[in-house]
Each structure stands twice: as C-alpha cells, then as structure tokens.
Amino acid sequence: MRRRHSDVVICLFLSLFLYSNVESAGSSPIPNCPDLDVLENQSDLSQDDLNNLILCFCKLEPNDDEKVAISCLYGSNMDHLMKATEAVKNASLVTSSISIQHMEFPDGGLPEFSKIAPQLQSLDIRECSGQDELQVGDDSFKGLEQTLRNLTIHACNLMTIPKSVDSLENLETMAFSSNKLDTLGVDQFKNKKQLSYLDVSGNFITSIEEKAFEPLTSLETLVIGEHNFVNDTVVAEIGRLKALKTLDLSRADGIFSPPEDLFKEIPQIETLKLSGCSIPTLEPGQFATLKKLKELDLRVNLIENITAYAFDGLESLQRLSIAGNFISNLEPDVFFGLSSLEDLDLGWNEIKTIPSEVFKPLAEKLKILSLRNNPISKLPSTGLGNLEKLGLAECGFTNITADQLKDYPKLMDLDLSKCNISSLDANTFDNQKDVLKKLNLQKNKLKSLPNLVKNLPAVETLDVSSNPYICDGELAHFVFGVEDRVKQSEQSGSTFFISNANETLCDRPYTLRGEAILQVEAEKFQPYDEQSDTTTAPTTTTTAAVEETTTELKIPDILVGSKTNDTLFKEEPRREVYDISKTDDAKGVYNQKGSYAVFITVGAIGLVSIIIIVAIVLFIKKNKAVGPEKSSGSPGKKGGKSDKVVKMEDGMVEIELDSQPGTQHATPSRR
C-alpha cells in the first residue's frame, strides 16, 4: 500500500531530523548542523530535537579545518540557513561557502549575507521556488566586496543582473544562467577585473551595450549560448575579450555559419563550442585564424557537406567532434592540416563509405575515432596504426574479421555493440590480443564465442550480453575461460570484469532459455540438436538411481551480476534524436571554477536518497523497541507495535528527479 504524500514528507523530514540528532550527539565538529557523510544509529526522539530540525547541512572544507560549506536542500528556508550559520559561529568556525537549492525565500528576498557569513567566499543559488523574480536587495552583498569569489544565481527569474553585484570587485566566477536577462549593460561588469569565468547562457539576450565587456581583462571562459541571440552587438563585445580561452556558443540563436569576423578578433582561444546551432556546411578557411585552437565542437548542426581543406590552419587542434549531423561523404582532403588531432568523433551521421586515404593526415597522432551510428557495412584500410580506441557501435557490420582490424595493432578499446555480427572467427582479434583491454559485443546476433577469453589475455572488461546464444559444448569453452581468468586475476591481483553478466543469457536450447550463461551448471552444456529442440523439456523416466558427482561451476558474484555496471554502455538515442545534453562528451571545455555547482547538486540528490533509506531503517528499529504497552493499537485489534512495523514496511517513499536541462533536484512525489 502506498503511503500518502503527507507521510512521505514526514518520512523525509524524519530522516533529516535523525541526521541532525547524529550530529548533535557529538559526531560532528559543528553541533546542531549535521554532516550528511556521517552515518550513525540514533533512535532517541524528543520534542526539543523536533523543534531544532533544519534542512541545511554543514561540512568542513577539504584541507581546511576552519572553513565550513553549508548546503541547503529542497524544503529549506531562511530560518534553517540562519540556524546553520549560527551553529558554525558557535563552533568558532567560518562559513566560506553556501549552496542553496529550491529554497522558498521570503518576500524581502535575499538576506544581508555579511551578517550571517562575514567571510563568505562562494554563494550558489539554484532553481528558486515559484515564478516570481528573486529579490536581491542593494545590501545583499554589502560587506562582501573583498571576500566573495564565486557567485551563481541560476533559474531564479532575474530580469537583470542585480545592482548589488556591481560592488563585488574580487569575483572570479559569476553565473546568471537560465534567467530572463535580455540585455547586458555597460555598468554591470565595470569592477570585474578579476573575473575569469562568466556564464549567462539560457537567457533571452539580444544586445550588449558597447564596451560592456571592456573591463573583463582576465576573462578566460565565456558561456553565452542556449537561446541567446548572437548579433553584431554580441559579436563586437566578445571580440574585446583578449584573454579569452574558452568560448561556448552552444545552442545560440542566429548562428548560420562560423563567425569568421569574430575569430579574427580572438585568435587566442583554445576551446570553441558551436554545437546545437544551424550551420549547414563548412568551407575552406573558416577557422584558419584560430591557430591555438585545441578543441572544436560542432555537434548537432545541419552539416551535410565538409569541403576539402575546411580545417586547414588548425595545426594545434587535438579534439574535433562533428557528431549528430548529416554528413554522407568524406572528401579525400577533408582533414588536411589537422596534424595534431588525437580524438575525432564522426558518430550519428550518414557515412556509408570511407575513402582509403581520407585519414592519412591523421595517421601519426590520432588515438580515438568514433564512427558510431553510421551505415558503414565494412571497415576499410585506414592507415591509423596508432589508434587506441575505436567506436563502431550501431553500424551496419554483419561480420568483423582479422583482416579488417589489421591496421590497429595498438587498439585497447573496441566497441562493436548493437551491430548485426552473427559470428566471430577464433583469430578475429589476433592483431590486438596482447593489447586489447576493453571489448564490447553487446546486442549483436552472436550464437557462440569461440575461446574468446583465452584468445584475449590482456582483456580487462568484456561485454557480450544480449546475444542469442546456443548454450552447447562450444559455448562451454567461453564459460571455462572466464572461470580460469577469474582464478588468474585473483592470484595476480589484476582486473577482469564481465559487464552485464545477468543479461548474458542462453537463447537455445529452450530448456535453458533465459538462464544466465555464467550460472549454468557445467553438465548442462550438451551438443545442440536443432531438430530435437522443443519449447518444453523432454520427459524423463528414471529406471535406476545412479549417484553421480559433478563439479559445480562457480563464478564469483562480481561476474554474475551482483556488482556489474548495467549502465556502462547506456543506450544512447539515434542520430535523428541526438540529445546533446545527454551525450555531451566535450571533455575539458569548462574549467573547475565553473563546474563546482553541478557536483554540489548531484551530491545532494545522492545524499537525500541515502538519508531516506537510513531513516526508514532507524524508524523501524525504534518501533521494534517500543513495548506493547506503548503501542497505539485500538482494543480488539492485534498489537499496535506490529501494525506500525507492517505499515512502515509496506509504505513507499518516492523521489522525483527533474531532468530538465540545467536542473537536477529531488522533490517529494505528489501522487
């Protein structure tokens, strides 16, 4: 029976309260402000404890025993924050960081933070409750002009950057993403000479006043895409940023070709993101001025054609992604000039054939190549002898042979999942047998795996799940090979892992259909006769009792699914529904200064989940400790104690995860 919404909320509050009691019991250096990483049993409940319940939590900063980070989760309010900062003060410590998510602010808006955290260095406010604009008073940051270094106000319906931000002279990172800004004024950045990271993405910006960005002499990262309109005023101001290294224009409106005029003004940039725009083609010379560019992201545009020499001049480029477009042909000199390229992503396109010489300019340096989700039926000779990782998932392969893989003697990671491969030769991976560490053959049409583990002595991670296997004597060699490798790994301390073991199942014979291959008893691997195989097990007649001893095949739990990583190769959407937010693999685009809030958000969600589980266990333990005389059962009914326990065991606590772009939070279900 599902618990009502009010009970769910009570359970959530109870869990948080239990943690508050844990900390107040002396396990935390900050009494009355719990640390969510501390897990201890606590079942003594009192009215005073309930009155002191807060939804803000304290944690010592790494490598600093005097500074404290406060995190306020969903359902918290200003009173909770006040109690948390007071607890830090009473412990003779300093509040250096405050993170707030889904807080209900009073009509007056933000408090004067210097009064509750006079040495505050980082403030992160996300997903404000309600539809009204967050009120940021003129005195909200008064007294923090020299101390505040990082400021984020995300998705709080701000119509403009608050006036009180003007006085913050030492800000290093500033984010006003996913608000309702429509213009950036000349006075909003006048005291921001220390600013190195600025994120104003997800707004409705259509203009920037002249010389607004001129004071930003230290700005290295600018994120200004996602619905903002890139017009002449925006281009002109970005061109003033002579220290800029990373420019993110992802999902920006108004970009129908690479902005060459802008590139001439900022030739020093090292990372450029133009994903999710409306670029239909790439012509020679469009990036030629970007001599220092190391990463270029052109995913999910409308690119159908890339002209030869389109990337000429990008001799420093190390990573290029053109995934999620409509490219069908690769001209012979399309990659000319990319002499330093190490990582190339061509996935989710319409490439059917690959010219034999097309990768010649990349032969020396290229280590990672993804051709995933292209209608390629055969892998030709590429000359990429230094390739270490090759992605061929969801292509049109019906077979893969040693001859097709002969060009890759250094290949350590090969993904052949979701193809149509029906068989493998024993020598298929002979050219990689001493170096291949990771192999994915998930969701093909394989019926057997001839000595696969034995033939790959270096393999550490293997996924052969979701294939229609015939569990006969031939497949037994694979199982025995796994068993031997497990023993070797245990003795040598090396790594060996079968991914998705519980999805590696028998398809035939029918008597074993659906059974995990690594759990099938050894004597059941018998020669397979398709003619006699039926959907029902054959009847057996016992004429004599014969005692027979067989050695049971035992595989450690890690190989039979108890600890397998079922999301290691998560199914990704096909090209026509390529989701850039879920497949964002542009590594290294943002520096650490701009990403700290994301980790706080993800961590908070995980911690709340843990809290709820622990709270339920503690609540059950407490109720088990209640004697019959304290039960609330009514006369004529069987003991109230057992009734309470049953209700708790039958109840359900539900958490909803908001997966909208830019948000990630936990909320009680409103069923």
Image (cartoon, rainbow, N blue to C red):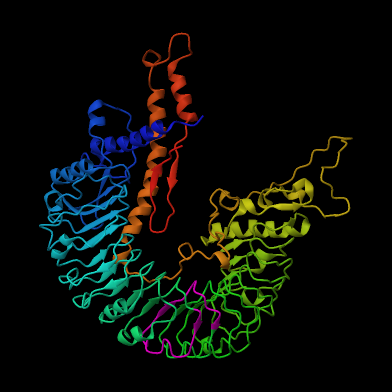
Q: Is residue 302 magenta?
A: yes
Q: From this viewpoint, is residue 29 visible?
A: no
**Quadrant in the picture for residue 193:** bottom left
Q: From this viewpoint, is residue 168 visible?
A: yes
Q: Main secondary structure of the magenta part?
A: loop
Residue at 46 percent across and 68 percent down: it is 585
Residue at the top extreme?
A: 636
**Quadrant in the picture for residue 201:** bottom left
Residue at the left extreme?
A: 143
Please indicate whether residue 111 sits to the left or right of residue 448 in the image. left
Closer to the camera in the image, 625 or 420: 420
Residue at 47 percent across and 75 percent down: it is 278
Closer to the camera in the image, 466 or 138: 138
* Residue 453 position in % (x across, y down): 65, 64
Please state the extent of the stretch shown in magenta in the rendering. Answer: 280-305
Please indicate whether residue 562 sits to the left or right of residue 72 in the image. right
Please indicate whether residue 112 sits to the left or right of residue 285 in the image. left
* Residue 323 position in % (x across, y down): 52, 73
Q: Relative to 322, is 526 above or below?
A: above
* Residue 181 position in % (x across, y down): 29, 63
Residue at 66 percent across and 60 percent down: it is 443
Q: Relative to 372, is 342 above or below?
A: below
